[in-house]
Image (cartoon, helix red, strand yellow):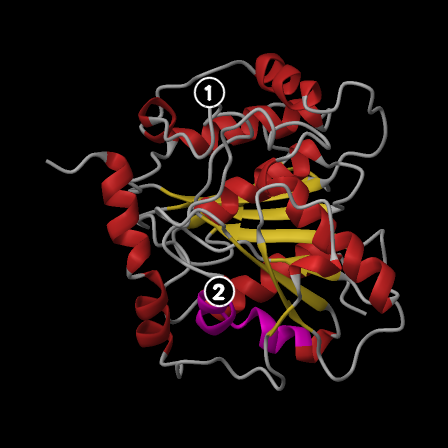
Amino acid sequence: MLNFHSTLHILEGIFTLTLAILLGLPAVNGAANNLTQVAASSFSPNPTNVGFYLYVPSTLQAKPPVLVNPHWCHGSAQDAFAGTQLATLADAYGYIMIFPDSPNTADKCWDVSSNQTLTHNGGGDSQGIVSMVNYVLQNYNADPARVFSMGTSSGAMMTNVLLGSYPDVFAAGSAWAGVAFGCFAGNGYDVWSNDCATGKIIKSGAQWEAIVKAAYPSYTGFRPKMQVFHGTVDTTLYPQNLVEEIKEWTAVLGLPSTPVQTLSNYPDSAWTTYVYGDTFHATNATGVTHNIQTNESVALPFSEQALKFLFVVLK
């Protein structure tokens, strides 16, 4: 019998193909330039040997934003580059993209469970990704005030981790079908949590806030804005995880626990977006499964909508 970890692997193992087929895309997206690998010797620290792939448009903003796009389980940096239109949007808006590649050869999921990755400058995959950001900031005159992360599933989990462990690096995140920071916490690297996946880990906002702030106890500065999406029929990472993300980030950001505005049928029919303030939005996608971004009619518009939330104004 398949467990939830195996189910996730099967679903995400076909994620690249389904994106290409459903969107009618070729094997490589419409990006004008190629994805390039940055040598491991060029950046550090990188304690888990995360692979570093970079997309740089021909035309950049004067001080370009940086968007990190962690891939899904059983995916790769190349899959994320080919399977979304984010690099094509980078050509249009002049931002630089980092496509990290998980060093976990077993299932290519990200480490969102170890104490190292859940701790500021503690090691793990998250620290390697932050080193990539620092490389781009130093070598491309990028804007340190506009560093963002956007990912789906395991990539959404890593987005939560990056914003929780490194609030001094990231300005905002967009997480699609993920879980709250610390929900997968366990004693080791890439530890699967059936309890979290099935929505059994339920905490108060104050408890989640304490977990996030324990990642960087001395930090008292700016907290990144966050946007989260989740399907109501996700049987891989249950919809309760959206509820927990809402409790976590509204508490961390000091926002009301109930929305100040509800947008029905936005950004799609039968989707509902709850606005808790300028710094946190949560979208409940009715009838949508774990493959939340694979709908051919809405994938690209949603990518743009998420980017606009992240960048505020793309200019």
SS for callout 1: loop
Left or right? Give the position of 249 relative to 9. Answer: right
Res 38 seen here: yes
- Report the number of numbered marks: 2
Q: Residue at x 78, y 58 (%)?
A: 135
Q: Is residue 273 visible?
A: no
Q: Nearer the viewer, residue 126 or 293?
A: 126
Q: What's the residue at 59%, 81% (across, down)?
A: 34
Horizontally, residue 94 falls left or right of residue 261, namely: right
Residue sitting at x 48%, y 56%: 71
Where residue 23 appears, as percent x and y from the top left, is 38, 75
Q: Which amino acid lies under the numbered mark 1 shown in the image of this protein?
A: Asn
Q: Nearer the viewer, residue 4 or 85?
A: 4
**Neighbour tally class for label 2: few under 14, some 14-19, many 20 plus, Cα within 10 Å:** many
Direction from residue 66 to residue 61 in the image, left or right: right
Return the residue nearer the eye: 125 or 278.
Answer: 125
* Sequence-first disc among 2 and 1: 2
Residue type at tag 2:
Ala
Residue underneath mark 1: 187
Q: Report the front residue among 58 and 116.
A: 116
Please identify the dominant SS of the magenta region.
helix
Q: Specify the segment rendered in magenta.
A: 78-90
Which quarter of the rendered picture does the N terminus lie within? Answer: top left
Picture coordinates of residue 55 (x, y %)?
A: 65, 72
Q: Secondary structure at mark 2?
A: helix
Q: Disc 2 marks which residue? A: 80
Q: Does residue 187 show up magenta in the picture?
A: no
